[in-house]
Amino acid sequence: MVPPPRARPGVKGPVLRVQPLEKTKVISAVTLLAGLVGACGKDPPPPPPAAEVAVSAAPCPNGRSDDPPRAELVKAHRLFRGQQYAEARALLDRLLEQKPHSATALAARGDATLFDDSLGYADAARRARDYYDRATNLVAQGCGVSRRTEYYLHMGDAFAALRLAPTDGGAFDRAELDRADAALRRAEERWPQSAEVLYNQARVQCARGDVDPCLERFSSALEAAGSLERPRFLRTHRSTEDWIVRSETQSEFGALREDPRYRAVIEEARARLKTRPDAGPAGPGASPRRRGPERGLRLRPDSRPPAQTAPQ
């Protein structure tokens, strides 16, 4: 039998004895209580951020145009050369559905539009420009193309601008001339000996009313045409006489033809041809001379007579 608690002097009633808690139990209780208080006072710390996966935004990560199989592009180019422009566009559209980042196919699609007379002279240029712009943007983002595609991408952009430059009042749209000039300058940086580039630069200068630089570029074009230094991938290498004949009806060259220096430049170019060891007939009525056979796959150039190259 447990004896009843004894009363202390001066204290009424019994006194209960409390057994002291062990030290470790007290510490655990305090720690748990502190944790609960802290959890109620603030949110737990966020987890460490997940490692971000680097994703390349470049349309052509390998640095080259993402092209369809070469055999398919060859088919499209052959249709183009055969003047089957609608069929070429249809094939290229199918290829672009599979390879939307093909700057090569986009440039070819622009050509298949630009040279199709059935689409209208100016309307074809507007439609083609969309494809040239898309191809140019891809190249700027790192989708490299062949030298030949690069060259004709610049030239196609320039040709489209030159078509759209004439206005109803007989003047020329300065913005379109500036665009053509910029495209031709890019081509000149890479191919300074291209008579095609120099000749079309002369067109731009004359359309601006700058006869002196127009004459200088025209003279350089005739000199380059008689030279062996030229891009080897040209669709067609026009002879000196070819460019002379075209200049006689080119709409932009009206002021140039009125300048007496125009005929002097032509006679000088013809005289240079006569002094060459392989010189053939030159002058009015002479058959156009093209150096060497066309090799490999080339797209057909604008075959319309010079008078139709730009509206009169």
Image (cartoon, grey):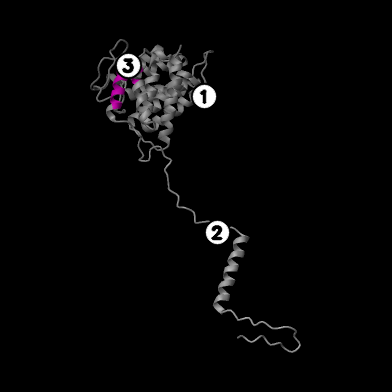
Q: Position of residue 206 (x, y in %)?
A: 47, 20
Q: Label 2, on which residue?
A: 45
Q: Position of residue 205 (x, y in %)?
A: 47, 22
Say which amino acid is labelled 3. Answer: Gln
Cα–Cα gap, marks 2 and 3: 68 Å
**Mark in front: 1 vs 3:** 3
Q: Main secondary structure of the magenta part?
A: helix
Q: Is residue 52 left or right of residue 268?
A: right
**Mark in front: 2 vs 3:** 2
Give the residue drawn at x 36%, y 31%.
99
Q: Position of residue 293 (x, y in %)?
A: 24, 22
Q: Label 1, on which residue?
A: 175
| N-term-proximal mark, 2 vs 1 | 2
Image-quadrant location for residue 303: top left
Say which amino acid is labelled 1. Answer: Ala
Residue 284, relative to residue 235: is it above or below? above
The part of the chain drawn in magenta is 72-88
Question: Which mark is drawn over residue 84?
Answer: 3
Give the residue drawn at x 46%, y 26%.
181
**Mark in front: 2 vs 1:** 2
